[in-house]
Amino acid sequence: MAVGRPGVPSVMAAPPTETQPSGWRAAVRWVRRQEGWVFIFPWVVGFLLLELVPYVFALIISFTQWDVGRPPIFIGFRNYQSLLTDPLVGKSLWNTGYYTLLHVPVSTLIAFTVAGLLNQKVKGMAVWRTMYYIPSVTSGVGMALIWIWLFAPRGPLNGMLGWFGIEGPRWLTDTQTAMPALIIMSFWGVGSSMVIFLAGLQGVPQHLYEAVEVDGGGWWAKVRHVTVPMMTPYIFLSLILGVIGSFQVVTQALLMTEGGPDNATLFILLYIWIMGWNAFKMGYAAAISWVLFVIIFAATLIQFAVARRWVYYEYQEPG
């Protein structure tokens, strides 16, 4: 037993024991621990019913022959064997890859440039930012109708080319210009990436630009040594979203060209839609869908692996 001076508690005395919380306090603590699950519950339900269950169902029917009107018949890997020899699968993948290789880098460059221009402190900038962003949230059907009119043989685009003595092509009915026409139209929706870049540009520390000025650097030195390195995480995000979105193009081709002419704009997702809802080969369409999922997943993993060499995060440790 520790002994202390009178009136002074001993440091060796046993600490007071805490009383057990009452029943209602324990209940309150339990509820607080479950608050996170309560907030994400709508998302969990939506994910299970609208994403996970359809994914599993598509995987199951990919091993069947099913035309919706009759019960599915299990055929094993026959659908996957058929798509390996289907020339339209190869054609649609080629078209999708061609679209991706041109659309993603050019649209990223355009969005980055526009974001840099809209990051200036001038009057009326909010109006300009809104004007550039609105097209990215425009309905796909409405956008397709506008561009059908623009690409018409006697439309505004060919009319502008006529001012310079250039005879405009038949954009959407020529195998040589149909895909470039859709790629040109895709630049209309750079507003989403522009917003991402604009947010990133506003977070670049100003003292880095001042340091470049002290060293005698101009605007190009600022862009090369400060802006681009600091923006690499946002560029990486834009590339990831751009590649995934490019593999899911369907509305424009369906409404504007229906995959033609001569399958020049037949995208892989459009071919899946044709097989599923026109030919009613649901099992075959599901098999192609899972192949597309594997391709997108592999492309994403490759981008993450390569990103380690060029993406800079401010908080990462050197080496």
Image: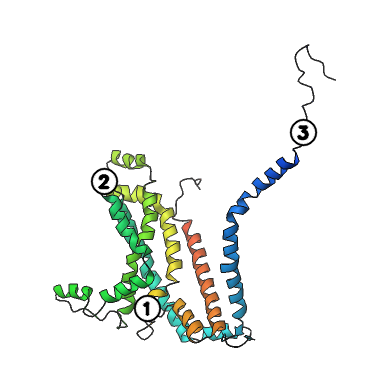
Labelled disc at residue 218: 2
Few, some or many residues within 10 Å of mark 1 (<14, 14–19, 20+): some
Q: Nearer the viewer, mark 3 or mark 2?
A: 3
The residue closer to the viewer here, 49 or 224, is 49
Q: Which comes before the other along the chain, label 3 or label 2?
A: 3
The quadrant of the rendering that contains the N terminus is top right
The residue closer to the viewer here, 194 or 208, is 194
Circle 3: element type: loop
Residue 41 in which image quadrant:
bottom right
The relative height of residue 158 versus residue 215 in the rendered view (above or below) is: below
Residue sitting at x 75%, y 42%: 23
Q: What is the CA distance from the residue labelled 3 to the residue labelled 1?
A: 71 Å
The relative height of residue 43 versus residue 163 in the rendered view (above or below) is: above
Q: Amino acid at mark 3?
A: Thr
Residue 145 in which image quadrant:
bottom left
Residue 313 point in image, percent of width and height? 46, 49
Circle 1: element type: helix
Residue 304 point in image, percent of width and height? 50, 60
Circle 2: element type: loop
